[in-house]
Image: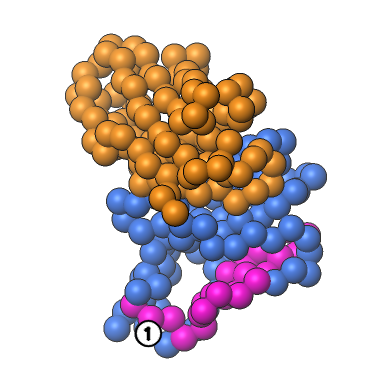
Chain colours: A orange, B blue
Amino acid sequence: EAGVTQSPTHLIKTRGQQATLRCSPISGHTSVYWYQQALGLGLQFLLWYDEGEERNRGNFPPRFSGRQFPNYSSELNVNALELEDSALYLCASSPWGGAQPQHFGDGTRLSIL
Amino acid sequence: EDQVTQSPEALRLQEGESSSLNCSYTVSGLRGLFWYRQDPGKGPEFLFTLYSAGEEKEKERLKATLTKKESFLHITAPKPEDSATYLCAVFKDDKIIFGKGTRLHILP
């Protein structure tokens, strides 16, 4: 069974640009979660999508947005990039929402110059 | 405020030296507690889910326990390959709240 896959592995941008990160969940999983893991801050919840709808979002500004496609894959968009957006962005999936274990991909390392 | 606190932040053990990692939480309406292992440059790997106080789960050298206010991850006779960051997380209100993790280093 293929795990959660994320692309690209690394992404380098400059301040003010826009970044798009992609995630393919485990086959059969309908829920996709996005997290930011910045140095020293731990994993911070960003967004949760299920069945194509945004179900919940964390304490991040609106320039962090995303969507989920009919095949349950997802993309995270970050507009007007700032230096502090440099982090590892992790995607996770679970069979459905709720208190289910989430299975993570290996992330996209976003570096802002 | 909902919080998940892990201690210690870092732990160095000799191979074979058993110990415990702590995860305390101040979350009302807990619906599940999760333990993950994260290796450098990788995403977290799921280890255990605990749903109610008194519950225990085991996997190889690891055993997780849960009380009403905290969870412990016991590591028995660890090996160098157990070196990693161990993350605790609680589920509440349709999101997971992670602790900052314990960095575990097992010396051969």
Q: Is residue B80 left or right of residue A29?
A: left
Q: Which residue occupies 48% across, 34% down?
A: A34
Q: Would residue B78 be counted in the magenta stretch? A: yes
Mark 1 burial class by Cα count in 10 Å: few <14, some 14-19, many 20+: some
**Depth order, front residue of B26/B43:** B43
**Depth order, front residue of B28/B60:** B60
Q: Is residue B17 visible in the rendered structure shown here?
A: no
Pinpoint residue A49: horizontal percent, then vertical percent: 57, 28
Q: Quadrant of residue A82?
A: top left
Q: Is residue B43 left or right of residue A13?
A: right
Pinpoint residue A13: horizontal percent, then vertical percent: 22, 22
Q: Is residue B85 visible in the rendered structure shown here?
A: yes
Pinpoint residue A31: horizontal percent, then vertical percent: 58, 36
Q: Secondary structure at mark 1?
A: loop
Vertical side of B85 occupied by A16: above or below: above
The quadrant of the rendering that contains the N terminus of chain A is: bottom left
Vertical side of B58 occupied by A7: above or below: above
Q: Which residue occupies 34% across, 22% down?
A: A20
| Number of on-image labels | 1
Q: Chain of mark 1?
A: B
Q: Is residue B14 left or right of residue B4?
A: left
Q: Which residue occupies 52% across, 79% down?
A: B60
Pinpoint residue B45: horizontal percent, then vertical percent: 46, 57
**The magenta stretch spans which residues?**
B57-80
The residue identified by callout 1 is B15
Q: What amino acid type should be assigned to the residue bearing mark 1?
A: Glu
Q: Would residue B49 be counted in the magenta stretch? A: no
**Depth order, front residue of A50/B68:** A50
Q: Which residue occupies 37% across, 69% down?
A: B83
The quadrant of the rendering that contains the C terminus of chain A is: top left
